[in-house]
Image (cartoon, grey):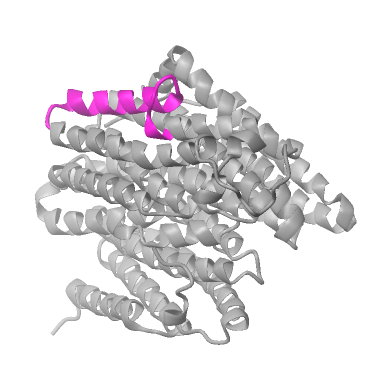
Amino acid sequence: MQVGLVHFLSLAAILFGIGLYGVLTRRNAIGILMCIELMFNAVNINFITFAKFITPEKLTGQVFAVFVIVIAAAEATVGLAIVILIYRNFKDVFIDRMNIMKW
Amino acid sequence: MNIRLDLMIPELFLFCWAIVVLTADLFFIKEKKNILLYMSQFGFLAAAALVIFTPTGPYEMAFKWMFINDPFASFFKIVILLAGFMAVSSSYEAVQKSIEHKGEFFGLVIMSAVGMMFLVSSGELVSLYVALELSTIPLFILTAFQKRYLKSSEAGLKYLILGAFSSALLLYGISFMYGMTGTTVLIAGSINILQYSNSMHFGLVMALALVVAGLGFKLALVPFHMWAPDVYEGAPTPITSYLSVASKAAGLGALVRIIYGFFTVGTASDYWGLLIAILAAMAMIVGNVAAILQSNIKRMLAYSSIAQAGYILVGFVAASQLGLSGISIYIFAYLFANMGAFAVVVAVGHKLNSDKIEDYAGMARRSPLIAGSMTVFLLSLAGIPPTAGFIAKYKVFMAAIENGTLLWLVMIAVATTVVSIFYYARVIKEMFITEREVAANPEGRWILSSPITIAILVGLLGTLIIGIFPQPFLELASTVTQSFVY
């Protein structure tokens, strides 16, 4: 059986789904950030797949994936800094403690 | 490849200026750091002047389609820069009192404005995404900027998680847009859709849903709004004002580019109108009803700005030149009223150390300027003549009525406007009528610092001038949207 477009897209969709599920259910802020990274990487697989199968003569998809990696890294940096800040202020990183503000 | 750096002069200038401000921080002793504030004010005004003198037109493009400097983009850039100017001006007290790293604070505000300026003029998905992140990542940091203040850190984490989550959704949608059309250029993509429309139905609808969800988070539309009140309450108030106006304007610019540029052709064109109309209706209903229940003025203004985004989308759904010029005038009116209202909140919060609505009691005696201008801002947000908000609401609703099929949406909009008057008027009633002994700060007349007075006066003048002499502004709004293709 030839591994084709649909297989890669399904892999990306499954990864994205796992990430989405994790963001919605994890209690640990670091876990949530990891799940968001998972979603970004699912997107990268999508881009590379489309670049390979839809536009094999152009590099647009690969370039986009590189940009996504760079920006995800920047976002993770800021994210971890804020998590450290949260740890200093709240003494843990569980998001169900982040309930000073409601309604 | 047309490398026209001359079109990007305002952005490039402002980017360099952010670095200048960051560096200048090192050279001033603590007592003289106010200079940084004046430098950032100058930066925003100078960039706005440069935007006016930069050539604009539907075919003024740089790097192929990556950067389009049409009049629509220039108009939004002016709005973003004015919002930045007013936010920086109103941050004088907050910066003196509770912001430790002043150079970084102003540098990040300017950097985020650069991102927003690129965002509203991007005609291509890579540049759009990069610009979006350049505008939001500094805002995560700015939200969490008061390091020892628990609410600020909590708001920062909430904004970060939901911001990153929404960009992941947006990106997944963008990857499908690219996969369906084989290009990241919006115009080229829509041409490809026209050719092979039928075979990509499912992918396009999915891309539309994901993109609208992703941008809906940035605009705080209703199913995606839960971060907004918390972030608005926890962030330093000048940043809240900047978030509520500039980031909303930029997100709206991106939404206009993507939806009008890409999804109005082919099979997805049957869906986006209804989708956005439902989002608009929910934003107006939930925003206005939830705002009634708030006792903190920042949260009340947060819900009110969710509702305002709904009114803007009413013009957006109309999908006509009238609707787009309605949006432009609305965002202009919203800029002055909301930035002014938040400047007042900063001033009062500084004097009273409180954001409670009940602490506004007797404001008319303490400071007639604050009470009077706050009244004008709130009336403008509610859409009562002779303020700018009335003209804006009128134009947007007219555009939706002329569309023909959107009468139900206009009826919801008008009904929720009536609801909104209730909670705006409650603040006015507290300021002018309620006689209550307020324990905190019984001192008489207030003296405000000059930067924040400038912010309040700019808001006041803008709101009243647009409200009383709307003609030149309406003409401006219709000329900037003329070149736009639907």
> Which quadrant would residue B460 be assigned to in this image?
top right
Q: What's the magenta region?
A: B381-405
Q: Nearer the viewer, residue B352 or B376?
A: B352
At x 46% / y 37%, what residue is drawn? B429
Q: Position of residue B248 (x, y in %)?
A: 44, 46
Q: Give the residue at x 13% y 58%.
A: B202
Residue B411: x %, y % from top left: 18, 33
**Residue for point 29% across, 40% down:** B419
Determine the residue positioned at 38% across, 26% down.
Answer: B384
- Residue B114 visible at all: no
Taking the magenta stretch, the answer to whether it contains residue B266 is no
Q: Nearer the viewer, residue B161 or A75?
A: B161
Q: Is residue B84 left or right of residue B464?
A: right
Q: Residue furthest left?
A: B198
Q: Nearer the viewer, residue B55 or A5?
A: B55
Compared across the picture, whether B218 is left or right of B369 comes to left
